[in-house]
Amino acid sequence: MRIDLISIFPEFFDVLDLSLIGKAQREGRLAVHRHQLRDFSFDKHRSVDDTPTGGGAGMVMKPEPWALALEHVLTQAQPPAHAQSPDAEGLPTLIIPTPAGEVLTQHTAQQLARTEHLVFAPGRFEGIDQRLLDWAPQHFDVRPMSIGDYVLNGGESAVVVMVEAITRLIPGVLGNPESLAEESHAHGLLEYPVYTKPARWRGLDVPEILLSGDHAKIAAWRAQQQDVRTRKLRPDLWAKHVVAQEKNLT
Ligand code: SAM
């Protein structure tokens, strides 16, 4: 997978060189390219923002540097992405982090992990001029996306969250792919509680069944714990799970 990150703070993405995502880059499973948005602004101050048309507080990101940066990414990507099919299929995916976007879920992360080329355009200030979003579908499959119903100062931290959630699902990135199958949100439920050694710690015992060595009984206990935890901690997910199960039965 190729990932392009465009920002006025490209150094924000240095954390992606650490841990499993850094390793995935070094192993060639993932190529992450960072771009300084100001390199595509040609006025004296390399400015990327201006006052909001119609008045109001804050500043708005200008569309022109963004369009030039995105066109630069298209010419760099191999094979040239804009030479591909003119419909959304085959176009690189452009993720625009915004609190007004579709909230990222594990299901969406699974879909995005199967794409070949992701481009991220995180905003600052009051966000990016709407015309950039109106123009971009000519060249990209545009996905305005949020990481939750709250507002950040800028989209870079949202990008780090999204990149981590997506790239850990690329085959080979995680050491043990089995951990993906049972973890929270993989199938609509939360994961069961986990324990390690020692069996007794500060007067608290590991559930006895986990020490039994009976794999069938352990699996049944864990499945039951997934239900209990989901019902208690996330009744919204539990309600969806019940509806899905009823649908499967009919
Ligand atoms: N004025 C915008 C609004 O009310 O929708 C908020 C702009 S916010 C201060 C600046 C940037 O942070 C946004 O352009 C977006 O890239 C990013 N951002 C803020 N909250 C976010 C969220 N929940 N998810 C994803 N990106 C977010």
Image: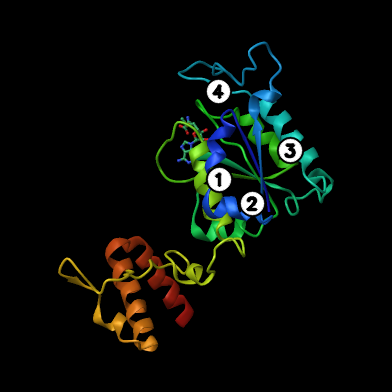
Q: Amino acid at mark 2?
A: Gln
Q: Nearer the viewer, mark 1 or mark 3?
A: 1
Q: Which residue is mark 1?
A: 16
Q: How far across and how far down the image is residue 211, in percent?
A: 30, 82
SS category of the residue bearing label 2: helix
Q: Amino acid at mark 3?
A: Val
Q: Which residue is mark 2?
A: 25
Q: Is mark 3 within 8 Å of ligand 1?
A: no
Q: Nearer the viewer, mark 4 or mark 1?
A: 1
> How far apart are the alpha carbons under marks 4 and 1?
27 Å
The reply, left or right, for residue 64 in relation to residue 160 is right
Q: Earlier in the sequence, mark 2 or mark 4?
A: 2
Q: Nearer the viewer, mark 2 or mark 4?
A: 2
Q: Nearer the viewer, mark 3 or mark 4?
A: 3
> How far apart are the alpha carbons under marks 3 and 4?
22 Å
Q: Earlier in the sequence, mark 2 or mark 3?
A: 2
SS category of the residue bearing label 1: helix
Q: Earlier in the sequence, mark 1 or mark 3?
A: 1
Q: How far across and how far down the image is residue 64, in percent?
A: 69, 24
Q: Earlier in the sequence, mark 4 or mark 1?
A: 1
